[in-house]
Image: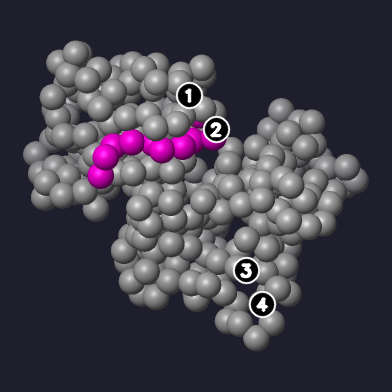
């Protein structure tokens, strides 16, 4: 059995916050989803939301630790988000801001802080397949934005907070020259370019044979395949785990993506491209793992 008390894992997404409360044996006690605060340049509104989630959790069971993960360029050791395009943050000391609000509400427990995609990767590689603990594995959630996390022999590569920001690379040629990769190859980008309320709505149009939606979808697959091919060539990935909201479309995304990556890797080992086991809950699960490790050992994974 782990350390005393339950842990609360909180994953801050571009559009929603996912929280998962688990006991010392890993049993899920509660799951909550709330909107991500907008117009929050200093993280104060986020701190209020996290504190409210923690108060609710502590009313249910003794709370031992909290894990909080966010998107962007995250420096875990300083507790700072250097840059998060989707949240409008630059050099925001998120851990300190949230910690102060928790203490104001009477919640004095260890607070683990990390990157949402790296936390999701941790959750995925610990999901039970021992092969994922060996060699190079990339976790790529295709959500509001696009980033990746590289796991080598079971350890996540942080790169000082900068590793995996594949969505921020600018496309240099072709019809999308000048755009960032995530503007074309993310759920958010697909929805915007198709003029739809969500990527799920675009997926339904693609299934119905809508040519405009299909063109946007094909662009996403092509640009994403370029990014995954380069990632594979550089890191020697044997497996790429695709998560996030767009991966929930299943074969509609993964089948053409596998074909496109294979076509780009002539003479290079083609990775297995698999759907995430945890879906869009991977970040919250990973946040819980960070909290549990800090509670058990005093060390952030």
Which tag, 1 or 4, sits closer to the chain's start? 1
Kindly report the distance in space between the C-alpha atoms of the residues bearing marks 2 and 4: 31 Å
Q: Is residue 246 above or below residue 230?
A: above
The reply to whether the C-beta atoms of the residues labelled 2 and 3 are less than 8 Å apart is no
Q: Secondary structure at mark 4?
A: loop
Q: Secondary structure at mark 1?
A: loop
The disc, 2 or 4, on the residue closer to the chain's N-terminal end is 2
Image vertical order of residue 223 relative to residue 261, above or below: above
Q: Specify the color scheme.
A: one colour
Residue bounds of the magenta highlight? 77-87
Residue 49 appears anywhere in the view: no
Q: Are marks 3 and 1 in contact (CB under 8 Å)?
A: no
Say what secondary structure mark 2 lies in: loop
Q: Is residue 142 magenta?
A: no
The image position of residue 77, as x and y in percent, is: 25, 44
Along the line of sight, the residue nearer the viewer: 195 or 227: 227
Task: Determine the residue positioned at 70% across, 73% down.
Answer: 264
Is the residue under label 3 in contact with that under label 4 (CB below 8 Å)?
yes
Residue of label 4 = 265
Q: CA distance from mark 4 to mark 3?
A: 6 Å
**Residue labelled with disc 3:** 229
Q: Which is in the foreground here, disc 2 or disc 1? A: 2
Instruction: Please determine whether, in this image, residue 205 is positioned above or below residue 276.
Output: above
Q: Is residue 288 left or right of residue 280?
A: left
Can you identify the residue that label 2 sits on? 86
Mark 1 surroundings within 10 Å by alpha-carbon count, few (fewer than 14), some (14 through 19), many (20 or more): some
Nearer-N-terminus badge (4/3): 3
Characterize the local packing of mark 2: few (<14), some (14-19) or many (20 or more) Cα atoms within 10 angstroms: few
Q: Is residue 275 above or below residue 64?
A: below
Residue 223 percent coordinates (x, y): 71, 56
Q: Which mark is residue 36?
A: 1
């Amino acid at each position: 059995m782990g350390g005393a008390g339950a842990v609360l894992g909180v994953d801050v997404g571009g559009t929603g916050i996912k929280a998962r409360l688990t006991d010392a044996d890993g049993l899920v006690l509660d799951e909550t989803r709330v909107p991500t605060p907008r117009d929050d340049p200093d993280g104060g509104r986020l701190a209020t939301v996290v504190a409210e989630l923690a108060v609710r959790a502590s009313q249910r069971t003794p709370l031992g630790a909290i894990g909080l993960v966010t998107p962007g360029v995250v420096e875990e050791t300083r507790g700072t988000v250097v840059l998060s395009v989707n949240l409008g943050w630059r050099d925001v000391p998120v851990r300190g801001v949230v910690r102060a609000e928790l203490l104001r509400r009477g919640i004095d427990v260890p607070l683990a802080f990390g990157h949402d995609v790296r936390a999701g990767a941790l959750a995925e590689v610990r999901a039970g397949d021992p092969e994922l603990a060996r060699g190079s594995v990339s976790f790529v959630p295709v959500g509001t934005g696009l980033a990746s996390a590289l796991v080598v022999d079971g350890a996540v590569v942080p790169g000082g907070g900068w590793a995996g920001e594949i969505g921020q690379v600018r496309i240099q040629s072709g019809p999308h020259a000048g755009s960032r990769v995530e503007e074309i190859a993310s759920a958010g980008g697909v929805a915007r370019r198709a003029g739809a309320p969500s990527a799920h709505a675009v997926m339904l149009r693609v299934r119905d044979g809508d040519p405009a939606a299909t063109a946007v979808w094909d662009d996403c697959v092509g640009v994403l395949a370029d990014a995954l091919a380069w990632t594979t060539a550089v890191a020697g990935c044997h497996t790429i785990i695709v998560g996030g909201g767009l991966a929930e479309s299943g074969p509609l995304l993964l089948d053409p993506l596998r074909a496109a990556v294979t076509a780009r890797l002539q003479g290079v080992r083609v990775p297995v491209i698999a759907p995430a086991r945890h879906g869009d809950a991977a970040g919250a699960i990973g946040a819980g793992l960070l909290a549990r490790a800090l509670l058990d050992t005093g060390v952030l994974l």
